Amino acid sequence: MDPALRDKFMGVSVATLATALFRRGLRNQVIQGVHPVRPKGANMVGPAYTLRYIPAREDRNQLVEFRNPEHPQRVAVETCPAGQVLVMDSRKDPRAASAGDILVTRLMVRGVAGVVTDGGFRDATTIGALDIPAYHTRPSSPTNLTLHEALDLNVPIGCGDVAVFPGDVVVGDDDCVIVVPQAIAAEVADEAVEMTAYEDFVVEKVKAGTPIIGLYPRTKDEFTSEFAAWRAQNGR
C-alpha cells in the first residue's frame, strides 16, 4: 500500500469515511457487530486479505485437521502479507472462535496490519494486550472446527453484512471497521482528510460557544474565511 495513502487513512475516523462513501452512493460499508477487542488509540489500515469459513461438517472437521499443513486457516496466518489486514468471514457466528492468541501473535510477528472477524476470538484478553489491532463480535472459546470450516483464501467474502474484496482498504478505529473499495480509495482518503480538518475547526468553534447552524454544515460565508485562517495558523 502506498505509504502516503496509508498515512491519510491513519488520520481520519470511520465515521468520516462513512460520510465520504455515502456521498458516492455507498451506504453499507461499515462492518456490523464488530468492535475492537481492546481499543488501541490508533487506526488499523491495510488492504484486505480474506479467509472464508463455511458451516463445519463432522466428517471433515476433527482436531486432526490442524495437522494438515495446507489447512486454510493456518495457511492464511502464514501467507497474509505484511501490512495487510486479515479479514475473516465467520458467518456472523461467534459461537466458535475464528482464531486464538497464538495465531494472532503469529500475525503480529509477521507484520500484519490487523485482523477482523465477524465471529469471535478465543483468548480475547491476551489478544487485546498484543500490539496488533484485532476486531471481533465477542470472546468465544470453542475451536473453530466445532462450527466452522476454513475453506477459501483471498476471495470475495461477506463480513458483518459487508462485501469485502481482496485489496479493498480496511480501516478500523476505536469504534468499528469500514471497507473502502480499492478503486476509489485515493479520492475517498483525500476527501476524508479535508473533512477532518474542517470538523476539527468546527469542534473548536462549538467548544467556544458557536451555534452549529451555518457552521456545520457550512452554509455561512463567514466560516469559509475563518476556516482558511485556521488552516493557515494550524498548518492544516
Image: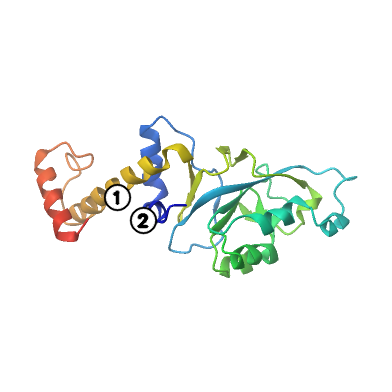
Residue beneath disc 2 = 11
Name the disc covering residue 196, or none. Answer: 1
Q: Residue placed farthest to the front in the image? A: 2
Residue 157 position within the rendered picture, expressed as x and y whole percent measured from the top left: 63, 39
Classify residue 220 as left or right of residue 87: left
Residue 180 position within the rendered picture, expressed as x and y whole percent measured from the top left: 46, 42
**Circles 2 and 1: CB distance less than 8 Å?**
yes
Q: Is residue 47 visible?
A: yes
Name the disc covering residue 167, or none. Answer: none
Q: Amino acid at mark 2?
A: Gly
Q: Residue placed farthest to the top in the image? A: 25
Q: Amino acid at mark 1?
A: Thr
Residue 202 position within the rendered picture, expressed as x and y whole percent measured from the top left: 22, 50
Q: Is residue 11 above or below residue 178?
A: below
Pointer 2 local density, CA inside 10 Å: few below 14, some 14–19, many at least 20: some
Residue at the spot 88% in from the left edge and 57% down from the top edge: 64
Q: Is residue 96 visible?
A: no
Label total for image: 2
Circle 1 — which element?
Answer: helix
Q: Residue placed farthest to the right in the image? A: 59
Quarter of the picture holding the C terminus: bottom left
C-alpha distance separating marks 2 and 1: 8 Å
Using the image as rendered, state which of residue 98 and residue 233 is in the foreground.
Answer: 233
Using the image as rendered, state which of residue 33 and residue 131 is in the foreground.
Answer: 131
